[in-house]
Image: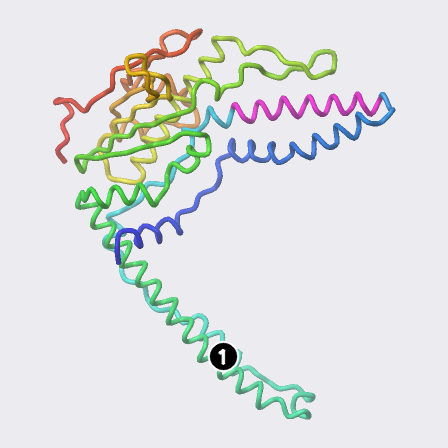
C-alpha cells in the first residue's frame, strides 16, 4: 500500500467539469476545420451572394474564436479542485460488502421460467445450469470489487494520515499524482513546488511570454474580415491578468490539495539573464498568500491583478503600456512564521 498506489486511486476518482471558458474555447477550435472548409467551398463558387455570406460567417467565427481564447486565458483562476477533506479520509469507516452482482444473478436464477420451446428442445436444464454458474461468477465479481474497495480505503487512510502528519513525502506525492495543474500545463504553464515545513508550500510558476496574447484582433470592415492592433494598455492589461490569474490558480490548487496555512507563489516567464547569458525565469509576480483571505475571494468576479495587489503581492506590472519589470521574491518572514 505505497504512497503512489494511494494517490493513483485518488486521482482516478477526482473528476470535475470543464470550466465554461475552457469548454467554449475547445468547442470553437473544433469548429475551425468545418468553418474553413465551408468558406473555401463557398469562395470557389461563382455566386457573389454566397461568397459575401461566407465571408461574413468566416469573420464572425474569427471574432468568436478570438474572444473565446482571450476569455480562456484570462479566467484560469476561476475554477479549482474541491478541497480535499483529509481528516474525513483518515477516519473513514471501512467499506461494507455489497453483493449487488450476486443478488442480480440469484434473482435471475429464481425467476427463470423455461419456454415451451426450450422444454421441447431439452435446453432448459442447460440454461438452468448456466444461471447457477452465473451466480458463482457474480459472487466472485463481488469479492473482487470488495477487495479493491478495501484496498482503496486503506490507501486513502494511509495517504491522509501522512498529509495530516505533515509528511513531506506525502505532500510531494499528492502534488505529483493529483495533477492539479494539468489545465495550466495545456496553456504552457509549468509549476514546480517544494516544502520545508508542513504549513506551507513554495511554488515557482513559469508562464509563456507576452506572445500568449495576440498582438492583433480580428474585426469587420465593410462586411469583410480585417484586423487591428490590440492597444498597448489592453495588451499588457490582459497579460497582467493572465499572469496574476495563474498565481491565484496555483495558490487555490495548493490550498485545496493540502492543509496549508500559506503558499509562496512566484510567477515568471523564461528570458535571458544579461548577467549570465542563460535563459531563466524572469519573475513578474511574487506573493506570500494566506489561506483564509484567498479562499474568501469571489473568483467569478475578481480582477486577478487587483486581487493580488490587495493581498500584498509584489508585481512588476507598473505601467500599462510596457513589459513588466523584475520583482523581489516574497518570503514568509519572521512575522508570519512557519510553525503549525
Highlighted magenta segment, given as a residue range? 49-70
On the image, the x and y values in percent for residue 107 come to: 50, 78
Residue 297 in the figure: left or right of residue 86: right
Which is nearer the eye, 109 or 159? 159
Q: Is residue 120 above or below residue 108?
A: below
223 part of magenta stretch: no
Q: Is residue 107 above or below residue 323?
A: below
What residue do we see at 70% from left, 30% from top?
Answer: 36
Which is nearer the eye, 23 or 43? 43
What residue do we see at 42% from left, 8% from top?
Answer: 322
> Splitting the image into 4 quarters, where does residue 203 fall?
top left
- Colour scheme in the image? rainbow
On the image, the x and y values in percent for residue 167 come to: 18, 44
Helix, strand or loop status at disc 1: helix
In the displayed orientation, state which residue is furthest to the front.
277
What residue do we see at 45% from left, 14% from top?
Answer: 237
Amino acid at each position: 500500500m505505497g504512497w503512489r498506489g494511494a494517490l493513483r486511486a485518488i486521482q482516478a476518482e477526482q473528476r470535475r467539469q470543464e470550466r465554461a471558458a475552457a469548454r467554449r474555447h475547445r468547442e470553437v477550435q473544433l469548429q475551425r476545420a468545418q468553418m474553413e472548409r465551408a468558406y473555401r467551398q463557398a469562395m470557389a463558387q461563382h455566386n457573389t451572394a454566397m461568397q459575401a455570406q461566407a465571408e461574413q460567417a468566416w469573420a464572425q467565427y474569427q471574432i468568436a474564436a478570438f474572444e473565446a481564447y482571450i476569455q480562456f486565458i484570462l479566467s484560469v483562476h476561476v475554477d479549482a479542485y474541491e478541497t480535499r477533506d483529509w481528516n474525513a479520509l483518515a477516519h473513514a469507516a471501512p467499506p461494507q460488502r455489497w453483493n449487488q452482482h450476486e443478488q442480480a444473478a440469484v434473482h435471475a436464477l429464481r425467476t427463470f421460467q423455461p419456454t415451451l420451446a426450450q422444454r421441447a428442445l431439452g435446453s432448459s436444464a442447460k440454461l438452468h445450469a448456466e444461471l447457477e454458474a452465473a451466480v458463482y461468477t457474480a459472487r466472485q465479481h463481488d469479492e473482487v470489487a470488495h477487495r479493491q474497495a478495501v484496498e482503496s480505503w486503506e490507501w486513502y487512510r494511509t495517504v491522509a494520515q501522512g498529509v495530516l502528519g505533515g509528511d513531506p513525502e506525502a505532500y510531494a506525492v499528492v502534488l505529483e499524482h493529483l495533477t492539479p495543474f494539468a489545465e495550466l500545463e495545456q496553456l504552457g504553464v509549468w509549476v514546480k513546488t517544494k516544502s520545508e515545513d508542513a504549513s506551507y508550500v513554495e511554488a515557482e510558476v513559469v508562464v509563456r511570454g507576452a506572445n500568449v496574447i495576440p498582438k492583433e484582433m480580428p474585426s469587420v470592415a465593410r462586411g469583410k474580415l480585417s484586423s487591428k492592433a490590440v492597444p498597448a494598455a489592453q495588451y499588457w492589461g490582459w497579460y497582467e491578468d493572465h499572469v496574476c490569474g495563474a498565481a491565484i490558480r496555483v495558490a487555490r490548487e495548493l490550498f485545496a490539495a493540502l492543509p496549508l496555512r500559506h503558499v509562496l507563489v512566484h510567477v515568471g516567464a523564461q528570458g535571458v539573464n544579461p548577467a549570465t547569458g542563460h535563459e531563466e525565469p524572469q519573475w513578474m509576480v511574487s506573493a506570500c498568500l494566506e489561506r483564509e483571505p484567498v479562499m474568501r475571494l469571489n473568483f467569478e468576479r475578481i480582477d486577478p491583478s487587483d486581487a493580488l495587489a490587495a493581498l500584498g503581492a509584489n508585481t512588476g506590472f507598473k505601467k500599462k503600456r510596457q513589459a513588466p519589470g523584475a520583482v523581489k521574491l516574497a518570503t514568509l518572514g519572521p512575522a508570519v512564521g512557519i510553525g503549525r
